[in-house]
Amino acid sequence: MSGGARRRILFVTSNGTGLGHLTRSMAIARRLDPDLEPLFVTFSAAAPVVAGLGFPVEYLASYDRPGAGDDLSWTLRNRARLRRMVDEIEPAAVLFDGTHPYERLLASLRFADAPLVWSRRAMWRRDADTSALWRSHLFDAVLEPGDFAESADRGPTVSRRREAHRVGPMVLLDRSELLSREQAESELGLEPGRTNVLVSLGQGASIREASRRCLEHLAGRGDVQVAAVSSTLAGAGEVPPGVVALAATYPISRYLDAFDVAVSAAGYNGFSELVRLGPPALFVAMDRRTDDQAARASWVEQAGAGRAVESPSDPELERKLDELLDPELRAAMRSRLDGIEAPDGAAEAADWLGRLARPQGEAARLAETDLPGDSGLGSVPGTGAQAPGPGLPGAPRA
């Protein structure tokens, strides 16, 4: 890369259940300094979403996609492709976001002295397979995106916090980027002056029944206008009359001010967006292999900032929905949400990653300087934790 070219940050994401890995990475990428150029490589079929937000992206089919071949051929093919990409990009830093790092591919992500970072979400289930955590030593640094419900975290990453650089919760958009209620209602085709409810549960066998129950219960109320994202409708079977279908709406957070109530899974991104940006929501805990959605959902109800059910089949679902439709209860939840404060984790991560991407001599000098208010060095604001060191800012101890 020529001396006048922008330094490049390569974001690599695995193929997760939803858009979590990509959304967190794009949240960071949007907040990088102008002298840094973000590029993406993803194993997620949602790669067009990245291109839609203006980022260069290369799609590699995940190992479980049709035509991927056996494990050996998939590994050899993608190891070679990644090596060629990295040699061409010449990244100043590489960030991998995924629960399970592809150990046999990591060597292909290394370029010269560019630090390799693992963005590792916390809130793992206590019974989760922890074998992936022992791959932390394969990275130069571990980044932990904050979670609003971190006080409820009882998972295996809690005991490993000292090896991570911790930042606040991450969301894609800032509040200033949301449309006004009037603009959002107009763009989504919603009738003004009604109580609007957003149903965004995703799809899959375990979710289908919960989606159907939500839509039927809400659509039967004359004072409520129900809108549902296309993925929820796809798994809900016959859709009740009057439900507004929201097709290909990403990011949905841009339209949140149009809604008085939301129904969402308790995954990292949906949860963080609704706690940060509102409105009050019913969180449905989904059964995931590592993500402790039940703990996250329970936390928001105990905080008085929303409602939660333990699973898509929870018999309390309709009753909890009715509570959210009570204007006084909803106003109290809104007030609690407004009182929840946390730093902008994506901005903090972008600043820290930018300093990691500096030439090694400059990065080392930064690591030795205690800059006031610098979340990459000393204490991490909002967490009470100490950032690790010495070495690269936030790098794991040897």
Image (tube, grey):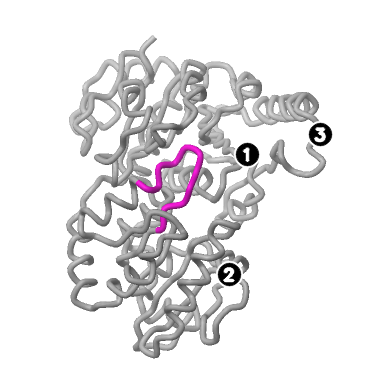
Secondary structure under tag 3 reads loop
Gap between marks 2 and 3 measured at Cα:
33 Å
Residue at 31 percent of width and 16 percent of height: 389
Residue situated in front as seen by the camera: 320 or 78? 320
Q: Residue at x 24, y 60 (%)?
A: 305
- Residue 214 vertical position relative to residue 159 in the rendered view, above or below: below
Task: Please report whichever mark, 1 or 3, sits nearer to the chain's N-terminal start.
Answer: 1
The label on residue 41 is 1
Q: Is residue 286 magenta?
A: yes
Q: Quadrant of the C terminus?
A: top left
Identified at 63% across, 45% down, the residue is 44
> Relative to 328, is 250 on the left or the right?
right
Q: Quadrant of the N terminus?
A: top right
Residue 283 in which image quadrant? bottom left
**Magenta part of the chain:** 284-294
Under mark 3, the amino acid is: Gly
Q: Residue furthest front?
A: 315
Is the residue marked by circle 1 packed among few (<14), some (14-19), or many (20+) residues within 10 Å?
Answer: many
Q: Which residue is mark 3?
A: 69
Give the image location of residue 184, x and y in percent: 42, 76
Q: Height in image: 180 above or below 106? A: below
Give the residue drawn at x 79%, y 44%. 66
Disc 2 on helix, strand or loop?
Answer: loop
Q: Which residue is mark 2?
A: 236
